[in-house]
Structure formats: C-alpha cells, structure tokens
Image (spheres, grey):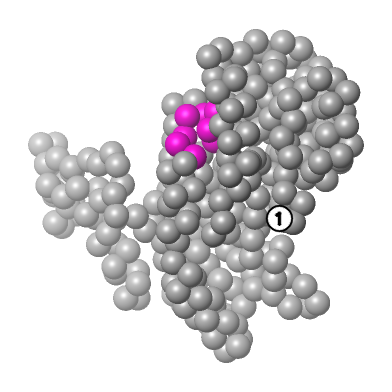
Amino acid sequence: MQIDRKALSESKKLARKYKPDLKGIVVAGIGGSNLGTLAIWRALRPEIEIGFAETLDARRLDRILPHVGAGTVVAVISKSGTTAETIANAAVLLGKAKKAKVVAITDENSKLWQWAKKNKIDVLSTPAEVGGRYSVFSAVGLFPLALAGINVDKLLAGAKKASAAVAEKSAAEIFRHYQAGKTIHDLFIFEPDLEYLGRWFRQLVGESLGKDGKGITPTVSIGTTDLHSVGPLYLGGPKDKFTTFVSVKKHGKDFTVPDKSGLATLVPDIAGKKFSQILNAVLKGVKAA
C-alpha cells in the first residue's frame, strides 16, 4: 500500500485549522463517500461525534440540524461533485445553519469544486485514479477522521501492515466456494461496533463483482444477535451460503456476570464469566456447527 503523503498532509493541516473551535462534524456523502469513514468511526468511537447525512432521510436530517451551527464543520463529499442525495442534504444543512463551516471534498474541477472555489470554501481533492468505494484512505476519510480526533498516521500504518498473503488466501477461498455454486457470502461479525465494517464490505463486494450477470451476494450478520434471527437459516437452510467470521482480540469494556441475585443460576456455567468469555465460547460453537 502506497500512502498518499500529500492527501495526508493537507487533511491533517485542515483538521488542525478547524479543531480549536470544533463542536461537531457532519458528513454529507453517500456510498464510497461515507461508508469507510462511518465504519472506522463506529469501530474506534472517538470523543467527537460525527453526524452522517446519507440518503434523503428527512427525519434523520431533522435530528441532526439542531446540533449544527457555529463550531460545526460540514464536510460535503462527492467524487463526481454532482451526487443528488449529497447535494440535497448539503443544501438543506447550509440553508438552515449559515454559521457552520464547510469543507468540500471532490474531484478537481468538478462542479462541487468550482462552487467551493467561487464561494471561498476550503476544498480537498479526491484522487482521480481511485474509485469512491476505495477512497477512505484519501482526504475522503482522512479529513473527517482526523478532525474527530483519530490518529490517522497510526490508521495508515496499520493499513500498510495488512497482509497481502492473507487477502489472497481469502480471495481464493471465496472463489472456490463460488465455483461450487455458493453465491451468498455472509460476513458474521462477533463485535457489534464493527457492524458498519460489514456494510462497507457489502458495498465493496456488490459494486465490484456484480457485473455481466455474475456476482456474489454479500450479507452481514452480527453475533450473537443474528444467531437468534437468521442463524437457523444458515444452519438448516439451503446450502448456497458460505461464511467469513470476524472477531477481535480485545473487546474493550467487559462485564463479569454476578451471581448475587440468583439469576445467573438459570443458565449453567455463566456465573463469574466475563462477557468476552461467553462471546468467544459462542463463536467457537458456531464455527463448529
């Protein structure tokens, strides 16, 4: 992985400019313009909240608007500069919150770029050679994440350490299942804060492989919640699915099940166990099943 030093430097510099008076962040973007950022933000949970204005959801936008004002940075992100949902959301946000600061992130010389320049609004460019769904490590993700307080240098360093060999092995396994007629690939995530990683994965697979009458249908499940919803289908339904399990080594906050109330005696062997221990035991059992 090659790090775009210019994008990193410009994103960090602009984030530092707005950080002193920052009270909130709103990302107006959809698809590749926000899914990667949303996945990382939800996984790392920094102190600064980010509101995401995606589809044309008037109720969600209405909940965001009272928190948008002086000290709020609205990042309008559209690679093409003409994404209808993004421009509509941004127009409402800026129309009702005139004191908010605005940053445009788009392809150089797009209509959004030209609008930003005309109105003396800060603008960051998206790399022309990188598709929107892969753009999280460009200004698209680096600026809002840096502004929210995430160490983007460490983020990129971690991404650079990703193993190509592991990715190739995973791709080979996916293709093997596809050749065997299994066309539904479920990402079963045993860490709820990574749910939006699954949604980003779904976009990457769907947009990249769904062509010419071919493709793999990506689905996302959350453990243990979906064991009590679609779990029976996975175990007893048609054999047209295959699964990739995702778990973490450290869950962060943990609880130990107390036995003072007597409730813990209703389920064998859970008294005194940590949540993480129970979750890992369930994961092990599901893999075996």
Point out residue 48 in the picture as x, y percentages from the top left corner: 49, 25
Q: In this view, does 39 lie to the left or right of 34?
A: left
Tell me, yes or no, if residue 258 can be seen here: yes
Point out residue 262 in the picture as x, y percentages from the top left corner: 13, 41
Point out residue 168 in the picture as x, y percentages from the top left corner: 50, 76
Q: Quick check: 226 above or below 234?
A: above
Residue at image coords 54%, 86%: 176
Residue at image coords 52%, 81%: 172
Mark 1: few, some, or many residues within 10 Å (few <14, many ≥20)? Answer: few
Q: Quick check: 267 above or below 125?
A: below
Q: What element carries label 1?
A: loop
Residue reaching furthest to the bottom: 180
Q: Is residue 143 left or right of residue 114?
A: left
Q: Give the range drawn in magenta.
A: 145-152
Task: Give the amino acid at mark 1.
Answer: Val
Nearest to the observer: residue 58 or residue 151: 151
Q: Quick check: 101 above or below 59?
A: above
Nearest to the observer: residue 191 or residue 75: 75
Q: Name the quarter where the N terminus is drawn.
A: bottom right
Q: Is residue 40 left or right of residue 245?
A: right
Nearest to the observer: residue 144 or residue 269: 144
In which quarter of the view is residue 202 placed?
Answer: bottom right
Nearest to the observer: residue 7 or residue 22: 7
Point out residue 211 in the picture as x, y percentages from the top left corner: 77, 73
Residue at image coords 72%, 49%: 127
Provide the residue designation for mark 1: 130
Q: Is residue 218 within the magenta segment?
A: no
